[in-house]
Image: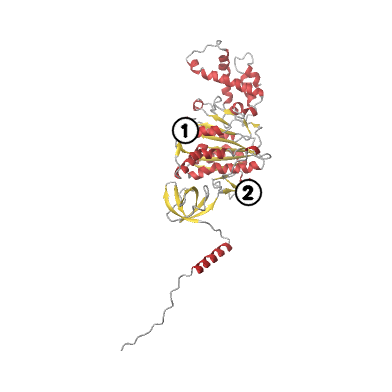
Amino acid sequence: METQIETPPQPPVQPPNIFSKLEALAQMMETQIASGMPLSRGGRVRTIAAGHYTVSGLSEHVRLGEFVVHKSSTGLHLGEVVRVEPDLVYVCAIEPGDPIGVNDIVLREGEFRVQPDDSWCGRTINSLCKPIDNKGPLLKGPKDRSITTLPPPSMTRSRVVTGFRTGVKAIDIFTPLCLGQRLGIFAGSGVGKSTLLSMLARADAFDKVVIALVGERGREVREFIEDTLGDNMQKSIAIVATSDESPMLRKMAPMVAMTIAEHFRDKGENVLFIADSITRFAHAIREVAIAAGEPPIARGYPASVFTELPKLLERAGPGAEGTGTVTAIISILVDGDNHNDPIADSTRGILDGHIVLDRSLADEGRYPPINPLASISRLSHKAWTPDQQKLVSRLKSLIHNYEETKDLRLIGGYRPGVDAELDMAVKQVPFVYDVLKQSPGDRTVIDAYAELANALRNAPGNNQPAPVQRRGA
């Protein structure tokens, strides 16, 4: 007879206590907060494409333009939110070479802000405000600033009233500038934009100089800073994003530079802001926008390009009453020497003047190759005296007659004594051109008008002073 062993009854299986898990989670959160370690919203990488990747789980917690941090096997890498959908966030990597993998963790970082300090003068930094000159870390200033801040309200800005000398004779005579003005230098590649900018960077009218080098060749950066700026580097800050860097860094460089310039302007200083070139800034915006799915509308440029340009350039100019000014001088690279391409045309309508560099003048060896007839300063009337204004008007008329009859003179069709106006142009314009020639190593010209008047007065064949000479004297 088999013996039956009775097993004790098993207690019923209890369902998991959800409340105990919540208590454990709450305790963990309290411990995390008490430790002082920051908490951040997170998501995971879902898709990867050329130029961007998508993240799920962050759509309700991020905004356009905010930064996120991608955690990979090689460390932490920054990215910027460029598009937000209900289920996905589109992110463009800030730094090139970010090894992204599906299901990688991405954390919200927030808005990128900078803390400029006076000790930054003499330094060279990148678009993330990290030093690249091997001179040690940067000190943080007392106030952090957004790189997408709005310009001062129109009715609270002070007026532009004070002219200044640039030291470039062609500009000081034909297109004089004022503190707080925004000027564009328009030229094709290899005509001399960067050389002219280097001459303008040495102007003595400014307390600080902030330079954004966007998409430049890597080998030219050190040459520009050490050879061109020289002693002026002590009052200058250079923000560099070379051509091999990501479009996000190239897009950020002039925005960071403008933010630093605003820091000094708000302290009451006159700041010179130089951007070389704003066209490459527009190209970077185009790359980011197309990666985010924005369609091109004007010769390959999306609409956001024409939104970002005035946002940046309107931040330059005079500040509120009692503060300083930001004088902006930017270069615009015109594709194929076409001065009506979308970027050149849009920028020209925003700025307070433009200087046109002519390739034919550069081919003749006339540097800087500024075309005085095509260049204009919309604030020149505030820098000229009445006599200077009459002189420049007279000179432009003579130059126009001289250039219009160039072919006639080349074939021998010009006869002296027939047209007195043309005779004067033929006699005096070559000496005007000689006066305007200038190289970066030339001495600083204090009074360009006096030098011009002296050259015309001593021109061979001038038996009597011409009206143009009396006005320039």
Which quadrant would residue 172 be assigned to in this image? top right
Residue 232 in the image, given as x and y percentages of width and height = 61, 39
Q: Is residue 380 left or right of residue 9?
A: right
Nearest the camera: 155 or 119? 155
Nearest the camera: 195 or 214? 214
The answer to whether 32 is drawn above or below residue 90 in the figure is below
- Residue under label 1: 335
Nearest the camera: 89 or 280? 89
Q: Is residue 352 left or right of residue 18?
A: right
Number of other residues with Cα within 10 Å of mark 2, as a class: few under 14, some 14 to 19, many 20 or more = few
Q: Quadrant of the N terminus?
A: bottom left
Q: Residue furthest left?
A: 1
Number of other residues with Cα within 10 Å of mark 1, as a class: few under 14, some 14 to 19, many 20 or more = some
Residue 93 in the image, given as x and y percentages of width and height = 48, 48
Q: Quadrant of the C terminus?
A: top right
* Residue at the (65%, 18%) spot, across then down: 470
- At mark 2, the secondary structure is loop
Q: CA distance from mark 2 to mark 1?
A: 40 Å
- At mark 1, the secondary structure is helix
Residue 379 tag number: none
Residue 15 in the image, given as x and y percentages of width and height = 45, 71
Nearest the camera: 40 or 131? 40
**Amino acid type at image mark 2:** Lys
Residue 143 tag number: 2
Which quadrant would residue 123 be assigned to in this image? top right
The answer to whether 288 is drawn above or below residue 362 in the figure is below
